[in-house]
Amino acid sequence: MIDQELSILADVSSMLRQHIENISIIEEFMEGLPSDYPCVYVYQSSNVINEKYRTFDTMENVVTEVYTCEIFSNLNIGRKQQIKEITDCINVVMEGYGYVRTYNEPTVTKDKSVSKKVVKYTKENLTGGQ
């Protein structure tokens, strides 16, 4: 299976910890709001085979991978700026792997004191993670 998940999650987490003080990083999908802020849920949300490039022996040669980042901040002042700084750190890592940001939207939360943005990155990966 063509899959860069472990290295991408490690690199995103490392970049965020270097640049964002006291950030909480959860490397999987979670329901609801986090207990610590700022927080990022970062996970591979899709990994599907491009059937056009599949061989007769069913070997996958090209997959489309999608990574989702749910970014949360509860600052009284500067929430939007904090979310932007977190997004910028994630962008550096994902662009380094050749991923394209395909979704970048704020999302309403039940708690009005918490801001959330969902960002998605997509790439067609070849055998060997090229």
Image (tube, grey):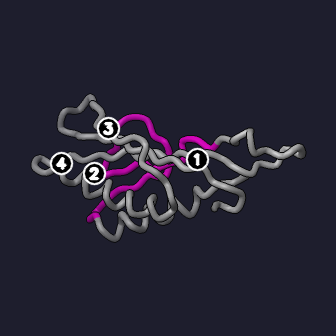
Q: Which residue is mark 3?
A: 105
State which tag comes first along the sequence, 2 or 1.
Answer: 2
Q: Give the secondary structure at mark 2.
A: loop
23 or 85: nearer the viewer: 85
Give the extent of the magenta segment. 20-47
Residue at 46 percent across and 51 percent down: it is: 100
User: Dot 1: few (<14), some (14–19), or many (≥20) neighbours within 10 Å?
Assistant: many
Q: Which residue is mark 2?
A: 37
Outermost residue to the bottom: 18
Outermost residue to the front: 52
- Front of the two marks 4 and 3: 3
Q: Please, what is the three-letter code of the amino acid marked with disc 1?
A: Glu
Q: Which residue is mark 1?
A: 65
Q: Are marks 4 and 3 in contact (CB under 8 Å)?
A: no
100 or 16: nearer the viewer: 100
Outermost residue to the right: 57
